[in-house]
Amino acid sequence: MSDDRITREMILGALVRALEPEPHVHALWEGGSEAFGRTDRWSDIDVQVDVDDDRVKDTLTLIEGILESLSPIRDRLEMPPGPGNGYTQVFYRLRDASEFLLVDLCVMKRSHPDKFLEPQIHGHVVFHVNKGGVLVAKPLDLEQHMAKIRARRERMEQRFAMFYSMVEKELHRQNYMAAIDLYHRLVLDSLVDALRILHSPAHFDFKVPYLHHDLPVEVHERLHVLFFVADGDDLRHKYHDASQWFRQTLAEINLMEVEAKLRSM
């Protein structure tokens, strides 16, 4: 049996056929790579389903039956409940599909206000079911988004100032495994956040995924080099370069310009 016998089209088709007739199901759509026009052979399937508040568990049971009718479910991982228990997210890997073709399922309560439909953040989602046009793309809540950016900027500045020297401490000890770990978790993590706020504020909290799409080419190439460390001496140089770049980037962030960039999207 081929590992790609079950395709994304087969999975989506089965879900739509089974869920659309159900009166408690109001909408079904794809986000993720499909919403950004980037789907390729390694993409998973990001599926969101909007249902009556009291039918989330029923819908999960129904969907799992649909998936099982296509292929045995090899792996299942349910995430902690979403904010206010407004949605349930479960990941599935099917035995007879490509190992990359995870089903990333999010079943949302009808009353949950955030459906992840802002194009600036989530791209242009693809509706397969949308009864009566019940769901529409919504504009970014600029005030709320900027409040999150300001909080992220303040936190990363304080966190970096407090802890960045821990990398150098472990370098002095020649404890290179700890130094590399701290370099990634403290220095590069802070640098990525700062670069995102400066260049891609809609995705300020997306971390490393999609950086090659969200940063200018020359910025991404410079950052790419800093992620790979050859030895202790190389780490020492890159740690200092990344730390200096973080401070420079932080100084370049003008929140009024960030807000103007968001308004223009």
Image: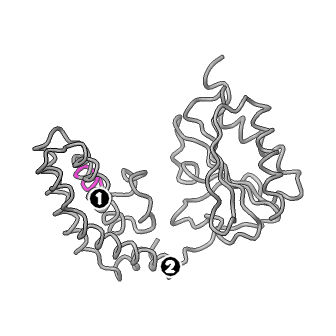
Looking at the rendering, in which quadrant would you find the N terminus? top right
Relative image position of residue 198 (x, y in whole percent): 32, 69
Judging from the image, what secondary structure is the residue with disc 2 in?
Answer: helix
Callout 1 crowding tier (Cα within 10 Å): few <14, some 14–19, many ≥20: many
Mark 1 residue type: Leu
Real-space Cα separation, disc 1 to disc 2, in angstroms: 28 Å
Mark 2 residue type: Leu
Q: Is residue 207 above or below residue 161?
A: above
Judging from the image, what secondary structure is the residue with disc 1 in?
Answer: helix
Secondary structure predominantly adopted by residues drawn in magenta: helix
Residue positioned 40% across, 57% down in the render: 207
Relative image position of residue 156 (x, y in whole percent): 32, 69
Residue 228, numbered circle: none
Relative image position of residue 32 (x, y in whole percent): 56, 51
Residue that badge 2 annotates: 142
- Using residue 263 as the reference point, say whether residue 250 is left or right of it: left
Reading the chain from its start, which is encountered first: label 1 or label 2?
2
Q: Is residue 85 above or below residue 232?
A: below
Residue that badge 1 annotates: 186
Residue positioned 80% across, 45% down in the render: 61
Residue 255 occupies quadrant: bottom left
Q: Is residue 252 above or below residue 63?
A: below
- Using residue 86 as the reference point, say whether residue 225 is left or right of it: left
Residue positioned 75% across, 71% down in the render: 111
Segment colored magenta: 217-222
